[in-house]
Amino acid sequence: GQNEMYRMLLASVSYLSSIVNKQAALTERIAENAAQIAALDDAYENRVKVLREDCERQVAALGLETLRKTAPLDDENLEMKRQLKLMTGQQVGRGDAMINTNS
């Protein structure tokens, strides 16, 4: 009777103890995973920020380089258009001499 109940109680305590320990282990592991996820998310956000800043610097540098290369070409085109405008209607003179008829 009582001896048998005592043995059942001891078996139950051992079983319940393992369940409690397992629950604690699972709870601890969940907390560890959550902390690791948060750290990885932070690292990701920081890396994205650095990459965006680097990309913005590269785009700005590319824009300046393009402007540096296109500005002289734009100036040259502007001068050639000015010359073309002056040439229209001016070829009224003799030989190479041109007379400006717009004045």
Image (spheres, grey):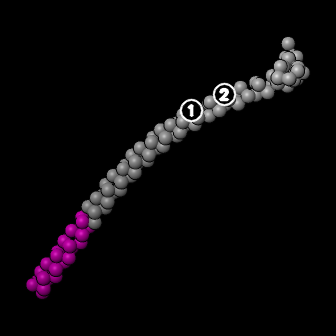
Majority SS type along the magenta span: helix
Residue ID at (70%, 30%): 77
Q: Position of residue 66 (x, y in %)?
A: 58, 37
Q: Does the magenta stretch include residue 8?
A: yes
Residue ID at (82%, 23%): 96
* Quarter location, residue 10: bottom left
* Quarter location, residue 97: top right
Q: Can residue 87 be seen in this view?
A: yes
Which residue bears the numbered disc 1? 68
Task: Report the side of 66 relative to 103 (left or right).
Answer: left
Q: Is residue 13 magenta?
A: yes
Q: Which of 3 and 47 is in front in this view?
A: 47
Q: Nearer the viewer, residue 50 or 24?
A: 50
Task: Report the side of 100 relative to 74 (left or right).
Answer: right
Residue ID at (12%, 80%): 6
For label 2, the crowd category at 10 Å Cα-Cα, with few meaning under 14, some 14 to 19 and many 20 or more, is few
Q: Where is residue 52 in the image (x, y as percent from the top left)?
A: 47, 44
Where, quadrant-wise, is the N terminus in this rendering? Answer: bottom left
Q: Give the range drawn in magenta.
A: 1-25
| Vertical placement of residue 24 versus 78, above or below | below
Query: Which labelled disc corresponds to residue 75?
Result: 2
Query: Along the polypeptide, which appears first: circle 2 or circle 1?
Result: 1
Q: Furthest residue to the top?
A: 103
Query: Which labelled disc corresponds to residue 14?
Result: none
Q: Position of residue 9 (x, y in %)?
A: 15, 78
For label 1, the crowd category at 10 Å Cα-Cα, with few meaning under 14, some 14 to 19 and many 20 or more, is few
